[in-house]
Image (cartoon, rainbow, N blue to C red):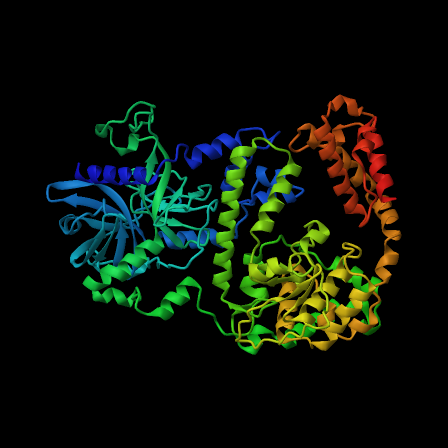
Amino acid sequence: MKMLSLFLDQIQRVRDRQKDKKISSVEKSSEIKNRPLTAVNPLDLSNYLKQHDLSVEQFINDPNFQERIIGRNDLLNVHYLRKGAKAAQSVCRIHITSDVGPAGFGTGFLIAPQILLTNHHVLPTTEWARYSSAEFNYEENETGAVLRTSQYRIDADKLFYTNEVLDFTIVWVDHNDRQGVALLQQFGFLPLRSDLGKIKEGDYVSIIQHADGSPKQVVLRENSVTDLSLTQFVRYVADTKSGSSGAPVFNDDWEVVALHHAGVPRYNTAGQILNLAGTVWDSAEGEMQINWQENEGVRVSSIIHDIRSHAIKQFSFLAEFFAPLSDPSIIEKESGTQPVELTDELYYPQADDEEDKKRYYREVGDVGKADYNRLQRLLESSHTNPLSYQPSKYVYPKVDIYPDGLLRSIYSGKSFTIEELQLADQRIDIERKLRFIEWSKKAGTMNREDYRSELKTIEKALPYNCEHVVCQSWFDAREPMRGDLHHLFACEPRCNSFRNNHPYYDFEGYKPIPSQMEKEMATCGYMEDDQFEPENNKGIVARATLYFLLRYPNAISVYKDDDIVLLKRWAKEQAVTLYEKHRNREIFLLQGNRNPFIDFPELIDSIDFQVSEKILAAVPHTAREVKSRNLAADVKRAVLMRYGYANPDPSVVEDTKAMTDFEFSDNQYLMLTASFNDIAVRYRAKPRKITVSEVQACGSIKDCIDLVYAAIA
């Protein structure tokens, strides 16, 4: 009964950590999943997407957002199962025994040679540890027969360290089994790593355990992390039972991310634990009858920190496996703050890139003689993997780093580590979510366009540490322009906000001093009359802007002929840098296309950007011939979504259907007009603006389709 009482104590600690959360994340997920999304509630949507590893942005901006919610890619490489089987070897069943006899079972696993990790409530004292033992290989083969097991004595005198608050114990295990025939080393061990970012909310976890003391079992994926807000613990949904205490919790790379230790039971209004029948649970029933709704594990990073801070002082040999915290280089390396300097070959493999360039431009022929149209078609057709706007995932870790492993703000030259900007963006994400939640409490149910508008407001107030050298507002933050890496650069919010959405300009009296690599500039540039001149890297941003103008003809109307002359001059005044060559290659590997003005700087003079204006007249006719059916479907889909369908099928609506059947309000007509204008922009860069009165005058669906056609003609 002592073990049960210790376990109940851990449950109480879990409950205390619940603070004043009224609804568990499991209940919220289930409630929202079963609710039809004909209308969108901001708070519910935020909770729902959190459970499905999607951002609100993705939900709104992705044209297939409903399909993303319905399903999730579960494809895994076959080696996933082999790695899992290997990880399982290090997991054992613990025979919990006191001085009066057997007291139950638990789970444990080796984290270093002869060092076993389990829960405090499994092995709370040296006395219990001395009487208990670790049994490995207790599992069934393919036919269901139990394999031959090996049982090992626990040497509590050699090592016993426990932490009641974190609910973990580490002990020493004999090298030979009790029969003296099997060596412990054959089972390997699962090293603990304190690296950041091994798991995030919504990720799947797997648990290998001896549930009810039975042969080894696995709770495989489909068990998601629900809460990472607790600094030392992690919450997840998974099937665990008595005997699972002390089991390792794995991510999809079979890295241990937590030590399973307790569940979150269901309570009645009086705060009493409920059993599986829904009545009040009695301790005499045993923990198997508790109605669990969620599970909790101890974070690996918390365990490692405690071992390094305290256990090493008692057992110095642990330093062999867990480096002490006094070594700052270890701390920097594990936290990701230590930059890794790259050799020239690693940073930019020139020979390999030259071969890639030859293959890339092969169809163009003599690149020096290529015109605007040929290069534009190449850039568009080779852009085979458009990426979403996620600078922490794409820009900071690889694309934008300098040879010394650091990032530098594109305008100020200020240096950052990769981890600094990633953590800064994580804080921004948290701030954005908090604002979104505060707003959603007051907003109630809203339409999609209002969501989009509010998100833009929040994003503008809290920008990432990343600069679009071609401002998002100029192309309405549409994809693939928004996530195109060729014009994304690391940039602290101070400079990002200072530049705002002002176009580049060359002020006659402003003479910026180019910064040295190691120097942090106090200023970002000069701004006056809604125009901006960068402090640094004019040639780099000019080449990025010229790429954009070539890749996306007429997507923006900010830069005129005189501005293009300026951009070309900046590009010629600053030679292409090794940093740009590195970026160009990494982006090519990620999204498929290249910036020709980096590969062939001489194109700056030969490409006539005025040709893009001539393309404007030809594009709509081509789009109408090739995509006329798509445009009609887009219009029908917009009408049905405005009517309330979450994932409409446009084929079920006849062109002749009367618009009066939908009984739209004035506000709905206003939103529908905005949708029609969005559709028109997809087919022509500068369509005629559609008015609300024109949409209200449509008698049928066909009239609406013709109206959008007329706007792009």
Q: Quadrant of the N terminus?
A: top left
Q: Is residue 450 visible?
A: yes
Location of residue 371 (image quadrant): bottom right
94 or 263: nearer the viewer: 263
- Using the image, determine if residue 442 lies above or below residue 143: above
249 or 688: nearer the viewer: 688
User: Residue 457, percent across and down?
Assistant: 61, 46
- Using the image, determine if residue 235 lies above or below residue 369: above
Question: Measuring 48% from the left and 44% from the top, which residue is drawn there?
Answer: 202
635 or 349: nearer the viewer: 635
- Using the image, determine if residue 339 lies above or below residue 217: below
Question: Measuring 72% from the left and 77% from the top, which residue is drawn there?
Answer: 573
Location of residue 221 (image quadrant): top left
User: Residue 418, percent across and down?
Assistant: 50, 64
User: Residue 68, percent across and down?
Assistant: 60, 41
Left or right of 221 on screen, residue 128:
left
Question: Measuring 30% from the left and 31% from the top, which residue is drawn there?
Answer: 290
User: Residue 516, percent across and down?
Assistant: 57, 77
